[in-house]
Amino acid sequence: MPFALLRHSLLLAGRGLRKTRRNPGILFDALFLPVVFLLMFVYLFGGAVAGSPQAYLQYIFPGTLVMSTLMAGLLSTGVSLNVDIKKGVFDRFRSLPIGRSAPLLGSVAGDLIRYGVALVTLFLLGYLMGFRVQTDLVSALAACGLAVTLGFCMSWINVLVGVLIKETSVVQSVGFLGIFPLAFGTNMVAPTETLPGWLQAWVNVNPVTHAIEATRGLLLGGPVAAAASTTLIWSAGFLVVFVPLAVVAFRRRNP
């Protein structure tokens, strides 16, 4: 049964990839928002925060990398599921001899292409702007893997929202509202010690902060083990909590 569920999920993930190929516009938010944020922060605030846009680019790029995977997962996964459920696509899946949770797992896995496109686009833009990896290829790939892991695991929060809420516009609004305290309540744009005390308290417990610190260490050099371990623990926690909740909610909505 676990093997069959995996096979069914992968087949349905292929459906998600075909949807992306036929409608590249669904990649827009995964590409557009991180690119705009990177350009805006570097050229508007780089001189004030780090003395020059070039120096600030080295500081902010790892955080933008993590933010891109969060946006790819938290802004679209639940919306896509919600649309398919409303259109009756999952009712047709229910009539097939496949695992009940396979459509859900397949939809989430199919969105992995968004993470890859977002990361490649950001690295290309960062290179053109002058960003350079200070470590090595293996460390850079590990940074990408860590960012994708957190983004994928946190996307299950949006999956739960997409299944529970019936209105697609509300699902999208919840995603936008959730991304800002998670992505910007970190040390992505400014060092933690420069922030107000109450904000430092949130930054220090925010799981995205640890992912950014680990990514900085992997791309620029510095301590990595503690931040990376904390990120993986948080990621596992998101999976343990939100995957079962999302599956139960999905089964109740599609009995």
Image (cartoon, rainbow, N blue to C red):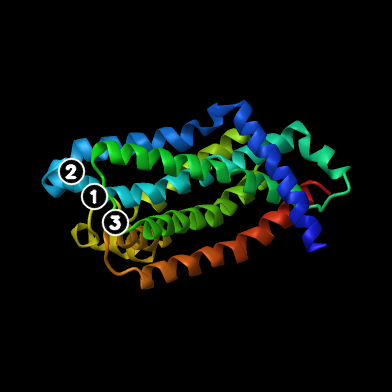
- Relative to 230, residue 120 above or below: above
Please state the horizontal and vertical placement of residue 136, each as a whole percent of the image. Answer: 33, 58
Classify residue 23 as left or right of residue 6.
left
- The first of marks 3 and 2 along the sequence is 2
- Foreground of the two, 114 or 48: 114
Residue contact between numbered discs 1 and 2, judged by CB atoms under 8 Å: yes
Circle 3: residue type: Asn
Residue at 56% from the left image edge and 39% from the top image edge? 76
Q: Quadrant of the N terminus?
A: bottom right
Please state the horizontal and vertical placement of residue 37, each as a whole percent of the image. Answer: 33, 38
Secondary element at image label 2: helix
Report if residue 101 is visible in the image. no
- Relative to 196, residue 45 above or below: above
Please state the horizontal and vertical placement of residue 67, each as a whole percent of the image. Answer: 40, 48
Residue 187: image tag:
3
Outermost residue to the left: 51
Separation of disc 3 and disc 1 at Cα? 14 Å
Asked which quadrant contains residue 15, the reply is: top right
Secondary element at image label 1: helix
Classify residue 115 as left or right of residue 82.
left
Please state the horizontal and vertical placement of residue 25, each as a whole percent of the image. Answer: 54, 27
Classify residue 80 as left or right of residue 187.
right
- Relative to 97, residue 227 above or below: below
Circle 1: residue type: Gln
- Foreground of the two, 149 or 221: 221
Secondary element at image label 3: loop
Asked which quadrant contains residue 26, the reply is: top right
Residue that label 1 marks: 58
Asked which quadrant contains residue 231, the reply is: bottom left
Estimate how packed mark 3 is, as few (under 14), some (14 to 19) or many (20 or more) residues with alpha carbons within 10 Å.
many
Circle 2: residue type: Gln
Residue at 61% from the left image edge and 66% from the top image edge? 240
